[in-house]
Image: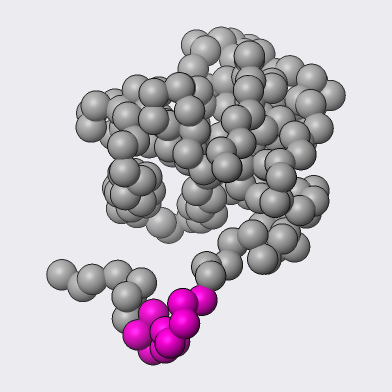
Amino acid sequence: MTTVLRATDSAEFLGLVPSLAGFTPRRSIVLLPFQRSRAHGAMRIDLPHDGVDLDDYVDTAIALLSQVSGTDAVAVVVYTDETPQHTPDGIVLPSSVVVDELLGLATDLGLRIVDALCVTPEGWASYLHDDPVLRAMDEIPAPAPVPGIADVSGDQDSGNRTAARRPRREGASRPRAARTIRPARP
């Protein structure tokens, strides 16, 4: 059975992300692969820390996204504990450089950009606007209930572990499964 969740604007879309991920992300970038107008899940990665090679980070993130068959578009949502920088010219959203690089590579690869949003302790805004406006958190509806997904109010460290587990195949051995998912080395 396919469950269809609908969003008519960015605030409603943000209300759906925890349901798609199975938890409420924190200190994360969530990439949502789209096929036409439908999101096909959510991929959460840690925000890059100081010293991370940004090109490698972005290349890896987009490579993971492109593994989802049929992906022709992407939405990006940053969940951060940082607050936006307030300048005389407006606000600068946290992780703007990372998001610009992600969107640039996605566009270069022919992916359409559905949305790019930032959720901070002060509110939420869009990276796609030249002059982002911080909107109130209470504009984001509570996560939509999805059949088969437990409570999504916990973050990635306390979320529903059973939602992310793969079913175990009869007769599959752990060492063989580990070899299967280990990345290939150049």
In the rendered image, the vertical position of residue 162 relative to residue 58, given as above or below: below
Can residue 91 be seen? no
In reply to whether residue 124 is colored magenta, the answer given is no
Point out residue 40 in the picture as x, y percentages from the top left corner: 47, 39
Coloration mode: one colour
In the rendered image, the vertical position of residue 44 relative to residue 165, given as above or below: above
Residue at 50% across / 48% down in the picture? 43
Residue at 57% across / 20% down in the picture? 126
Residue at 39% across / 23% down in the picture? 36
Say which of 186 and 132 sits in front.
186
Residue 118's image quarter? Answer: top right
Point out residue 15 in the picture as x, y percentages from the top left corner: 71, 30
In reply to whether residue 176 is colored magenta, the answer given is yes
Say which of 170 and 41 sits in front.
170
Can residue 63 be seen? yes
Q: In the picture provided, is 45 more to the left or to the right than 124?
A: left
Residue 93's image quarter? Answer: top right
- Quarter of the image containing the C terminus? bottom left
Q: In the picture provided, is 113 more to the left or to the right than 186?
A: right
Residue segment shown in magenta: 168-177
For the view shown, which residue lies furthest in the right direction?
Answer: 138
In the rendered image, the vertical position of residue 18 relative to residue 133, given as above or below: below
Q: Considering the whole magenta stretch, tell me its main secondary structure.
A: loop
- Quarter of the image containing the N terminus? top right
Point out residue 180 in the picture as x, y percentages from the top left corner: 32, 75
Say which of 9 and 81 sits in front.
9
Point out residue 52 in the picture as x, y percentages from the top left corner: 41, 56
Residue at 50% across / 23% down in the picture? 115
